[in-house]
Image (spheres, coloured by chain):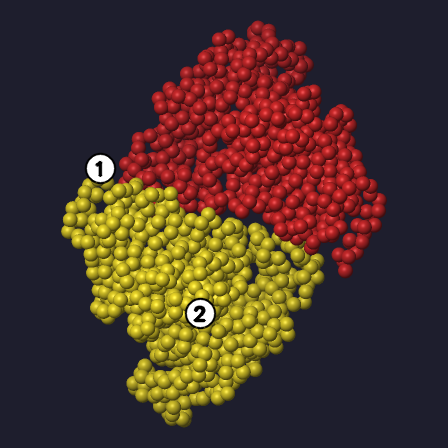
Chain colours: A red, B yellow
Amino acid sequence: MKRFLIISSLWLVAVTTTLAQDLQSPDGNLEMNFSLQEDGTPVYSLNYKGQEVIKTSKLGLELKNDEHSLLAGFSIEDTATSHFDGTWEPVWGEEKEIRNHYNELEVKLKQAETNREMVLRFRLFDTGLGFRYEFPQQNELGHFVIKEERTQFAMAGDHTAFWIPGDYDTQEYDYIESKLSEIRGQMEKAITGNLSQTSFSNTGVQTSLMMKSDNGIYINLHEAALIDYAAMHLNLDDEKMIFESWLTPDVNGDKGYLVSPTQSPWRTVMVSDDAKDILRSRITYNLNEPLAIEDPSWIKPMKYIGVWWEMITGKSSWNYTDEFTAVKLGETDFDAAEPNGRHGANNENVKMHIDFAAEHGFDGVLVEGWNIGWEDWFGHSKDYVFDFVTPYPDFDVEEIRDYAKSKGVEMIMHHETSSSVRNYERHLDTAYAFMNKHGYNAVKSGYVGDILPRGENHYSQWLVNHYQYALEKAADYKIMINAHEAVRPTGIARTYPNLIANESARGTEYQAFGGSKPNHVTVLPFTRLIGGPMDYTPGIFEMDISKLNPDNDSHVNSTIANQLALYVTMYSPLQMAADLPEHYEQFPDAFQFIKDVALDWDESIYLEAEPGYYLTIARKEKGENNWFVGNVNGNEERISNISFDFLDKDKDYIATIYSDGKDAHYKDHPQSYEIREVRVNHRSKLSQVSVPGGGYAISIMEVDKDKAKQVKKL
Amino acid sequence: MKRFLIISSLWLVAVTTTLAQDLQSPDGNLEMNFSLQEDGTPVYSLNYKGQEVIKTSKLGLELKNDEHSLLAGFSIEDTATSHFDGTWEPVWGEEKEIRNHYNELEVKLKQAETNREMVLRFRLFDTGLGFRYEFPQQNELGHFVIKEERTQFAMAGDHTAFWIPGDYDTQEYDYIESKLSEIRGQMEKAITGNLSQTSFSNTGVQTSLMMKSDNGIYINLHEAALIDYAAMHLNLDDEKMIFESWLTPDVNGDKGYLVSPTQSPWRTVMVSDDAKDILRSRITYNLNEPLAIEDPSWIKPMKYIGVWWEMITGKSSWNYTDEFTAVKLGETDFDAAEPNGRHGANNENVKMHIDFAAEHGFDGVLVEGWNIGWEDWFGHSKDYVFDFVTPYPDFDVEEIRDYAKSKGVEMIMHHETSSSVRNYERHLDTAYAFMNKHGYNAVKSGYVGDILPRGENHYSQWLVNHYQYALEKAADYKIMINAHEAVRPTGIARTYPNLIANESARGTEYQAFGGSKPNHVTVLPFTRLIGGPMDYTPGIFEMDISKLNPDNDSHVNSTIANQLALYVTMYSPLQMAADLPEHYEQFPDAFQFIKDVALDWDESIYLEAEPGYYLTIARKEKGENNWFVGNVNGNEERISNISFDFLDKDKDYIATIYSDGKDAHYKDHPQSYEIREVRVNHRSKLSQVSVPGGGYAISIMEVDKDKAKQVKKL
């Protein structure tokens, strides 16, 4: 009886609705329209300053074993608009306060034939649109299986895109810059090898997808708040230039099992005629739920080094012995095994790293390969592959713990799951409790290789659900997570800021696997970083990998100055200095920037930006009056012109500029750099050459007038 | 270097081996032969008293993506024979001491082309053969994937078999009695409906498989110690009468992922010319590992009633409300929902059951449907289906706990997983801790419906591994498990006796789902019970189910006397009196047997046995001088003739005989029974009629001579 009354009241409201609805962004630049087509198909469009950005695009979901689906036959039952303007303080971030400002349109739809209700909720910000599907609790739509989400993004032209191949298992690709119409032709060569990958279409690409129209409008497509739902790819109809959502399937090819009340993630469209606005936009975070952790005081940014690059380059090994082709945890006797003499995670080496971290002010030391199981960890679809608590004979957990503590350094845990996810979930409590016991506050988790349960994909609903499970459980244990090979982030760190970083893109490790494109880091902030910070592991000073391992002829396509700039341009509360201590000791003056640079910020100023070409950002250290500037440059030499007008008017500063040397080039002279100390104030301007794959970094410290005067003016 | 020396020494031993090996059982009745065929294929055969039981049969495994597999090309590297004779005391069981007595043959094989080693280990007992494959740790065979195990059991004739269809997900079938050659023709009608089933072959059957040859030899095929391996079915080549192993596949059709050192479960062949020996044999337990629980004192047999039969018959419901077609745990508001008025697990009804249990001396009360989620628990492939800790509004966990405690009754927990196995594993610690907190020492777990991870099967390696995980974790929490719909047991309760029962066959519930064959219970002890006890839930007194639920016209194909006998013939340390208290109150004299019958035994005497036809067993109560006898009868009336010579010679006893009434019949007069009290001693003999679907039960209590004399002699 109660239910009947509610339905009746909704029908009464429905009388007041119309068939089309417009919505404007607070600044009026963006305008969207929602309507129903004649057959009751919901559609939307989006304009920016009067120009079409999204042409009329369909919305809906195709359901499995359901003749009606949620595609058409809808009528508008009710609409409501509202306005929101508020601010919130992130636990860490690019600024101390984030404004959440949007106009909202809520459209309640009813499918007459099925009596089902579906709500479409649109939020229009100054920098873009977010919308999602909501499925209220209802007996007519209790459980349903998504065959495919049919959300369209109809482009208004053959834009230039920075894209990576659609893939159910990896995002570790170099970006391709091409016209949308050229995607199909370039797909084959874009799909480079990976340890686990599943492509699906010649025109399928991943989000966040960065585009630029011929008339200079920047458009970014992504999603926010991906919770218990499959990650979205975009499949392009390259005749009509319409992208359509393509969810990651499960083992049976199904795209999602939902139970009402529930909702899809937000689909986001960022738009501006200024690329800097894409970086400035916070709609991805704003579309996520507020902080879910009552007391987040244990979450803190970290700068760290690690026993890692030596394994990545092949100089040392994760595994302790070469004696076994197969390991049976609990049975294989490592104490009796012959060490291979190349094991990186040994007490001596780890202590050296702790010493180095302590000497240079790093917060933490990551050690990979400390726990038994690395002899056969990959490629065998092995269920019980790691136990996450048993060290190799040459790694003494207690000794290392005590030593690190005595030096004031935190150890960072490493949990490679080898994608054996059931095994990881079974050990999660024990592993986290082990971390608590031994003083590890952060864990780098890894999901290399094909997923177990076999047949599942890294980005399917099953796995998305897993990453979230591990994250929320970690919060219970006050543990910060840096998840590698997991699904790319979608702003969930607003809610769970213990997700301090992800990999989920082609990281620095590929510089030791054959190299990445020199302009790679000018793209990432417009794509991968839209959803959250990346553990990019910058700071490589030795670009010739054969010097570490004669069998590895890879080259790091970056200058030292570019490497330094990454600490500013690639925002993350977790920053690694990834190279070997001995390489830092070779270049102590350049290393100084890595030591100085802050991790958390009161303010970020986007000075120059063009995806794929260049990027210059200035950031103000949290709680301090120091600024750090980073410029990364693309494939061609360029002069960066910036003003220091962001500095306080009445203050004096000394700037240390770490720039490319005159003969620098990512390929030939990557280690050529110059450092100069100059006096700057808010009137200063800089014109600085950055070479191909180069850039510059600046630290700007407030000083008193007298000290400033000892230094030459810029 | 060390490894090389070991291999060398094995080669030295190999010189002493021969190409064929014979082995005899301790009593000499069984003789097996092992040899290699010309192409290096291992084969074995088995004779009983000079007659062929297993004709020359191949052994080996086909591996995935491996041109050599483990099928042929072997040479014998070493053989060893040994003798074992020992006894062990089960925590509970059909007798207080079990003899483990066998001759063993170990054959070390080497595959020249691959340098791989495989060990075949045969143990020949007086009642049968057990053998398994062992894969020692070796670099040549580290990880491997089983495409199919190719173990043959070549029958010597077209035997009569009691079989159920091979199925990856259920054993809940009525048994078919047919010639092996008739299996194919009868398969289609043998496959009756079930909530989750996957058949695979027209000649595929399940183990344990009971057979009888034309010349009266009983043969039983099963497996022991099924750990981290797929459950074995048998597929019949019905031209050659060769059974071959057919493992349960995973989602990709693969049969198992193994890592050396490891081994297969034991494959068992029980043989005798006396069917009673099949019941007497303990080879399944003996082939399992010894007790793994240090102090098993918390494991104890239980007799229980439950809020269960009323739901099974449809008289009441598991779910609390009919308002929701979908439930979202944590969001759906049950307090505000309208109760359906049929919810069985309500405080009042549960307390009534506790009162009844206390009054009649039952140890425990099971309550199903106490926890939220039953509204949409089945058929939706729902991941987060139960949380195992949140009660419905009308079930007060604390109140029930305290009430039960005050009455000296234990509550039995119920965990229906709906086969959402990841969800169950995630909640396992919390659920078990909840049980500890609220005084539940035993749990009935259920795996109804299709498995999540989707595509997996109830009996694949993934799930076998899960059941074991839940069992071992339960031991950590001192919790006893009664797992329903899980894989059929294989004697693992020797190692983990907290596995006090399984369902894993067609239980009494099917008497409310259309009925089972009257002779079903004369087959189960020869098939399902070979691997361990069954929670068969006997004790139904009201055979007309329409009296409980007018919409259910099912009939229980059994007499009351037959129901009583089941407490003796269907050995289990967990015994339910499944009917409603009100039905027991209608027949208090018959109910007395259920109250009296013991749960644990010092000795068991198999008096009469013919699978599918009849079964009479006498058991001596543990620590007491009381005996209980049970006879169950098949489809035809029969006179059972037994002697009481198992009684102590110098003692007097009063026997209470619960037999079928003169007009009794499972169909027409199932409630017709007679009870008579007679004096018996070791010279007494009984000639007792059992009607179709009938039987008798006897309790025999030692009394002093004077008291005995007051009672009429048998």
Question: Between A634 and B518, which is closer to the camera in this rendering?
Answer: B518
Q: Is residue A458 above or below residue B684?
A: above
**Could you tell me residue B287's position as x and y percent?**
32, 61
Q: Kindly identify which chain the residue marked by label 2 belongs to.
A: B
In the picture, the quarter occupied by the C terminus of chain A is top right
Residue picked out by circle 1: B1
Q: Amino acid at mark 1?
A: Met
Q: Amino acid at mark 2?
A: Ile
In the picture, the quarter occupied by the N terminus of chain A is bottom right
Look at the numbered discs 2 and 1 and tell me whether their residues touch, using CB distance below 8 Å. Answer: no
Question: Between B461 and A444, which is closer to the camera in this rendering?
Answer: B461
Disc 1 crowd rating (10 Å Cα; few below 14, some 14-19, many 20+) is few
Residue at the (50%, 83%) spot, across then down: B665
Q: Earlier in the sequence, mark 2 or mark 1?
A: 1
Residue at the (33%, 39%) spot, across then down: A325
Residue at the (72%, 50%) spot, across then down: A116
Q: Kindly identify which chain the residue marked by label 1 belongs to.
A: B
Question: Between B447 and A360, which is closer to the camera in this rendering?
Answer: B447
Going by the image, does B124 lie left or right of A482? left
Q: Which structural element holds mark 1? A: loop
